[in-house]
Amino acid sequence: MKKFKFTVNGKEYDVEVKSYEGENAEVVVDGTQYKVKVQREEEEVPTFVAPKRPAPKPAEAPKAEEQHATPADGYKSLAPLPGTVMQIYVSVGDTVKRGDKLMMYEAMKMENNFLAEVDGTIKEIKVRVGDNILQGAVLFVIG
């Protein structure tokens, strides 16, 4: 129970709130009990509106020949996940096409095939069977 002091037209009243549920309350004013209906003023809560951003400019898609082009020092194939090299299917000097299997590795307790991402010739193999590899490590260089 909460107790309040109200002053109405210069006269002070002791008010005790016995119960309050929804919009109904039982109050005692200077020893007399009343059942009253409480009206609340709705407070307007400010709503945050994010400023509008300009629409992004559409990126130009690379031309088909640029998508599979290899840099002068070779395309570096990177490990997508950490894991262990289980088998390597290619050797230095082999010609590969995009989608060819280069190796199999275990990552997250699953055997995964690692595929060539570009057409070219295997210039370097940076891993051996049994190696533990980290995500982002260079596995092959394809030129």
Image (spheres, rainbow, N blue to C red):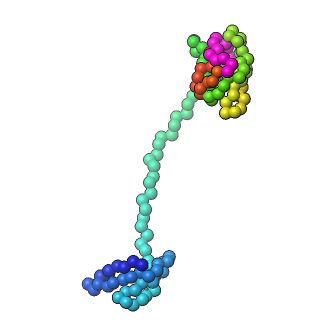
The quarter of the picture where residue 120 lies is top right
**Could you say where residue 51 lies in the image, as x and y percent from the top left?**
44, 47
In this rendering, would 21 be left or right of 136? left
**Could you say where residue 92 lies in the image, as x and y percent from the top left?**
68, 10
Q: Is residue 126 magenta?
A: yes
**Viewer-side residue, 128 vs 37:** 128
Q: Which residue sits at x=62%, y=16%?
A: 126
**Viewer-side residue, 93 vs 52:** 93
The quarter of the picture where residue 29 lies is bottom left
Q: Which residue sits at x=42%, y=64%?
A: 44
Q: Which residue sits at x=37%, y=89%?
A: 31
**Could you say where residue 102 lies in the image, as x and y percent from the top left?**
70, 19
In this rendering, would 62 be left or right of 39? right
Q: Which residues are magenta?
A: 114-130
- Which residue occupies the extreme front position in the image? 130
**Could you say where residue 30 lies in the image, as x and y percent from the top left?**
35, 88
- Which residue occupies the extreme bottom position in the image? 32
Q: Is residue 66 visible?
A: no
Q: How many labels, in total?
A: 0
Q: Where is the N terminus found, in terms of image quarters?
A: bottom left
Q: Which residue sits at x=44%, y=82%?
A: 18
- Which residue occupies the extreme top position in the image? 93
Q: Where is the C terminus found, in terms of image quarters?
A: top right
| Figure check: 49 above or below 113 | below
**Viewer-side residue, 23 vs 140:** 140
In this rendering, would 13 be left or right of 85? left
Q: Is residue 123 magenta?
A: yes
**Viewer-side residue, 49 vs 121:** 121
| Figure check: 138 above or below 54 | above
